[in-house]
Amino acid sequence: MRAVADTGPLHYLILLGHADILNALFGEVAVPEAVRDELAHASAPDPVREWIAAPPAWLSVHPARPDRLAQTDAALDPGERAALALAMEQQPDLVLLDDRAGVAAAHALSLVVTGTLGLLVRAARRGLLDLPEALDALDRTNFRWTSSLRARALVEHTQRRGHER
């Protein structure tokens, strides 16, 4: 599987200490330069800036293509626009986005999307992490989500585990 990522999912997975699940799930993750720059920005948390300063081999950074950017929603932030432009070019199996407007724009482009929560659930299904622990850690960040979404993820995960036994 191939994936293109926006800043959000990378940011939170790094903070949770689970960025390596991307390698296990996808092998390679592509990001545009704008996402790299957002991760390296002075306002980003230290662990995020340190991670992107020495990125893993499975992360590839791609230059922006202005012709592709023009086809994306100008209302999106630069990282989202660049990630969608890169996804349109590479046609990955999955685009990693958290922002609702970005997700809607990706769906309008017929791209398949998941976000931080979806990545954690996928990783838990593969035995790469403990989902309740990861969600507790996510609660300690500034990630915005509803308690009902959190509960639904746990219930689905528990039900799936029950069916696999």
Image: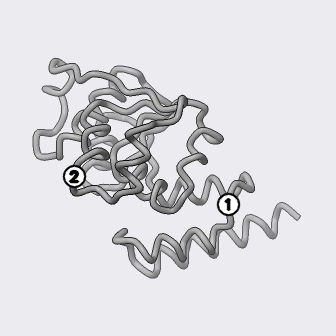
Which of the two labelled residues, at mark 1 and mark 2, occupies the earlier sequence position? 2
Q: Nearer the viewer, residue 135 or 18?
A: 18
Question: Which residue appears at 60% of the width and 38% of the height?
Answer: 23
Question: Which residue appears at 65% of the width and 41% of the height?
Answer: 24
* Left or right position of 22 against 80: right
For disc 2, the neighbor class at 10 Å (few under 14, some 14 to 19, many from 20) is few
Total marks drawn? 2
Residue position marked by numbered label 1 in the rendering:
129
Coloring applied to the structure = one colour
Secondary structure beneath label 2: loop
Image quarter of residue 44: bottom left
- Position of residue 122 measured from the top left corner of the image (x, y, whole percent): 62, 53
- Position of residue 39 measured from the top left corner of the image (x, y, whole percent): 31, 46
* Left or right position of 39 against 95: left
Q: CA distance from mark 1 to mark 2?
A: 30 Å
Question: Which residue appears at 33% of the width and 25% of the height?
Answer: 88
Query: In which quadrant will I find the C terminus?
Result: bottom right
Query: In which quadrant will I find the N terminus?
Result: top right
Image quarter of residue 73: top left
* Left or right position of 84 against 72: right
